[in-house]
Image (cartoon, rainbow, N blue to C red):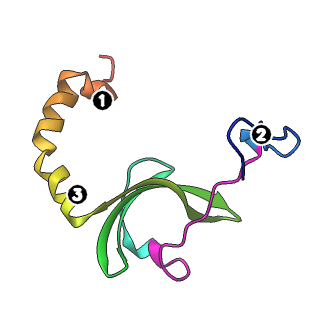
Amino acid sequence: MLKRGKKRDASKAQSKGDERPKKITLNAGNEWEKNVICELSKKRKVLVRNWDGKAVMDIREFYLEDGKEYPTGNGLSFFMNQWKILRDHVDEIDKLMMLHGGDNDLIIEPR
């Protein structure tokens, strides 16, 4: 443990490129795969799972290892009360996304 005012030994520090994504356990084995609702991008997925008896909606990053996908610790988890708040504000979020150029992802073919 580092104490206030002491510097970390540079020889023990890992470079950011050498770090491996941290695995998290969502359910036994790869049961999380059947809980995936949609893919937001190549590395991000939305899934719903049970955690400690409570429903949780995750937006999680995944990584590929040995031909299999695994969830990382990077992402957001929403309990039901948080999900309801977010869901109730979707129209406002949509309006502001469009106001700030949210339609720039559309691919318009030249004529």
Mark 1, residue position: 106
Mark 2, residue position: 15
Q: Secondary structure at mark 1?
A: loop
Give residue 100's position: percent from left, percent from top.
Answer: 24, 22
Q: Is residue 39 left or right of residue 22?
A: left
Look at 79% across and 44% down and name the residue there: 14
Q: Please say if 15 is above or below 49.
A: above
Look at 61% across and 64% down and name the residue there: 23
Sequence order check, earlier mark of 2 and 1: 2
The amino acid beneath tag 2 is: Ser
The amino acid beneath tag 3 is: Gln
Look at 16% across and 58% down and name the residue there: 84
> Do residues under tags 2 and 3 come within 8 Å of each other at their CB atoms?
no
Give residue 71's position: percent from left, percent from top.
Answer: 53, 62
Image quadrant assignment for residue 51: bottom left
The numbered dot on residue 82 is 3
Q: Secondary structure at mark 2?
A: loop
Q: Is residue 61 left or right of residue 3?
A: left
Give residue 93's position: percent from left, percent from top.
Answer: 18, 37
Q: Which residues are magenta?
A: 18-32
Give residue 68's position: percent from left, percent from top.
Answer: 62, 67
The amino acid beneath tag 1 is: Leu
| 2 vs 11, nearest the viewer | 2
> Do residues under tags 1 and 3 come within 8 Å of each other at their CB atoms?
no
Residue 24 part of the magenta segment: yes
Q: Please say if 100 is above or below 93.
A: above
Alpha-carbon span between mark 1 and mark 3 = 30 Å
